[in-house]
Image (tube, helix red, strand yellow):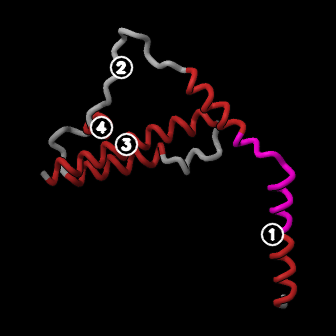
Amino acid sequence: MTFTEFLVIVSGLAIGYWLVAVFIPNARSSRDEDAEAAAERDDGPGRGQPRERPAAWHETLGVDRDASQEEIVAAYRRMIVQYHPDKVATMAPEFRELAEKRSAAINAAYDEAMRTLRA
């Protein structure tokens, strides 16, 4: 394959990608807008109802409060593999949103655990 053939292939792919991006409406952005509109309408818990308290870091990671650093790291890796957004990228938007929330909670719990170990 010569350089000219390679250049023609790459430029054809780039032009094709551009044409698809321009002429096919972005369905994802409309789904995101619908989800944002639904989130704005959602008032959350009613008045007088207690909000759910966030779980402690050791409950989120599934370890004891006095767990060693190795146990915490192992639990974090085990949990994040299940809920990492890259693992659920091809699933429905509801699953992706749940996985993003769960992985954020796992990361926050891990950060808090590491801070308590250093203290």
Cα distance between the residues tagged 2 and 1:
50 Å
Inspect the image, locate mark 4, and give the three-letter code of the amino acid beneath it: Gly
Q: Give how far across and how far down residue 47 sits, in percent.
A: 40, 10
Mark 4 or mark 2, which has the lower sequence index?
A: 2
Residue 72 placement, left or right of 49? left
Cα distance between the residues tagged 1 and 3:
39 Å
Mark 4 or mark 1, which has the lower sequence index?
A: 1
Mark 4 or mark 3, which has the lower sequence index?
A: 4
Residue hosting label 4: 62
Residue 37 placement, left or right of 13? left
Mark 4 in CB contact with mark 2 (< 8 angstroms): no
Residue 103, placed above or below residue 41: below
Residue hosting label 3: 106
Which residue is drawn at the image coordinates 43% and 16% (left, top)? 45
Circle 4 SS class = loop
Circle 3 SS class = helix
Residue 79 placement, left or right of 41? left
Inspect the image, locate mark 2, and give the three-letter code of the amino acid beneath it: Arg
- Look at the image and say whether residue 20 sits in the magenta stretch: yes
Which residue is drawn at the image coordinates 29% and 49% (left, top)? 111
Residue hosting label 2: 51
Q: Nearer the viewer, mark 4 or mark 2?
A: 2
Residue 19 placement, left or right of 118? right
Which residue is drawn at the image coordinates 23% and 46% (left, top)? 113
Cα distance between the residues tagged 2 and 3:
20 Å
